[in-house]
Image (spheres, rainbow, N blue to C red):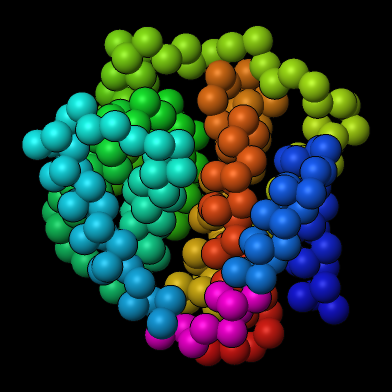
């Protein structure tokens, strides 16, 4: 029953993002649902093992941009880099919570990952996306009681905001157009319903498969709130394909947790 609720709420959230379906969009959503099912079928160890390859790839992209800053990138490549930067950070964060390392090591590792992901997004012209992500991270650390790390992330968020402004990206805009009032309520309601459901999983069992959906839906909810409420000029609402890429692993892992698979 819980799995049906998660699947239906996720589909409702997806529908609200896309709003109008064409054949191409319907095929993309179908492919995303198939990918989520594949992740659901994966063993937990396989998901945990993805952490280090993604982190290494994120660092490799940073090095590539450092030596070739003017490399031309197509839109799919930009989205792949954004996905890689976010998920390498998220998976390390989940592992950090399980191992409880020394404070200095945690701050150093998070700082390196933050600047690597931020640099990648800066080079793709999407650094403004880091703001909602960082705000969700601050709230996540506050909930976990990691209060001493929050000032560092807060300072990095201010730097990211300043660099976005210097890059010419408008942080605030006129808001998303073509979105009806009912769609706004569905977006907010579905995202927060999934956030609450993932929080219940964390309360039951604080493992990677529980923490990953919680932080992921916290980020999605924060992004939707910033775009609809604060009128951010950039976010997942403006990029439905990137939204699907972020949402699919969260849904697959959340279904796995509710299904009792490991």
Q: Which residues are magenta?
A: 37-45
Q: Position of residue 85 (x, y in %)?
A: 35, 48
Residue 197 visible: no
Quadrant of residue 127 in the image? top left
Residue drawn at x 80%, y 43% is 22
Q: Position of residue 66 (x, y in %)?
A: 12, 36
Quadrant of the image containing the N terminus: bottom right
Q: Does residue 5 show up magenta in the picture?
A: no
As drawn, the residue found furthest toward the right would be: 182
With 75 as the anchor, is 188 left or right in this view?
A: right
With 41 as the anchor, is 161 left or right in this view?
A: left
Quadrant of residue 57 in the image? bottom left
Location of residue 101 with respect to 121 vertically, above or below: below
Residue 80 visible: yes
Residue drawn at x 26%, y 68% is 52
As drawn, the residue found furthest toward the left would be: 67
Q: Position of residue 53 (x, y in %)?
A: 27, 68
Q: How many marks on residues?
A: 0
Residue drawn at x 35%, y 19% is 164
Q: Position of residue 97 (x, y in %)?
A: 36, 66
- Which secondary structure dominates the residues rendered in magenta? helix
Residue drawn at x 37%, y 53% is 84
Q: Nearer the viewer, residue 260 or 49?
A: 49
């Amino acid at each position: 029953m819980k799995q049906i609720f998660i699947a239906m709420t996720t589909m409702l959230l997806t529908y609200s993002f896309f709003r109008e379906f064409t054949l191409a969009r319907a095929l993309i959503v179908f492919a995303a649902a198939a990918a989520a099912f594949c992740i659901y079928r994966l063993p937990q160890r396989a998901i945990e093992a993805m952490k280090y390859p993604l982190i290494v790839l994120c660092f490799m992209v940073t090095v590539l941009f450092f030596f070739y800053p003017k490399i031309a990138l197509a839109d799919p490549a930009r989205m792949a880099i954004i996905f890689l930067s976010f998920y390498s950070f998220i998976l390390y964060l989940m592992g950090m919570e399980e191992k409880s390392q020394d404070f200095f090591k945690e701050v150093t590792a998070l700082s390196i990952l933050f600047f690597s992901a931020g640099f990648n997004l800066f080079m793709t012209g999407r650094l403004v996306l880091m703001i909602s992500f960082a705000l969700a991270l601050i709230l996540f650390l506050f909930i976990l009681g990691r209060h001493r790390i929050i000032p560092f992330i807060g300072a990095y968020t201010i730097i990211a905001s300043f660099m976005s402004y210097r890059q010419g990206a408008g942080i605030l805009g006129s808001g998303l157009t073509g979105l009806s009032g009912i769609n706004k309520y569905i977006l907010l309601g579905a995202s927060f319903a999934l956030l609450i459901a993932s929080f219940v999983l964390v309360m039951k069992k604080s493992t990677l498969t529980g923490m990953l959906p919680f932080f992921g839906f916290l980020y999605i909810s924060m992004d939707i709130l910033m775009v609809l409420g604060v009128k951010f000029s950039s976010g997942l609402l403006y990029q439905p394909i990137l939204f699907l890429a972020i949402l699919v692993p969260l849904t697959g892992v959340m279904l796995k947790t509710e299904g009792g698979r490991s």
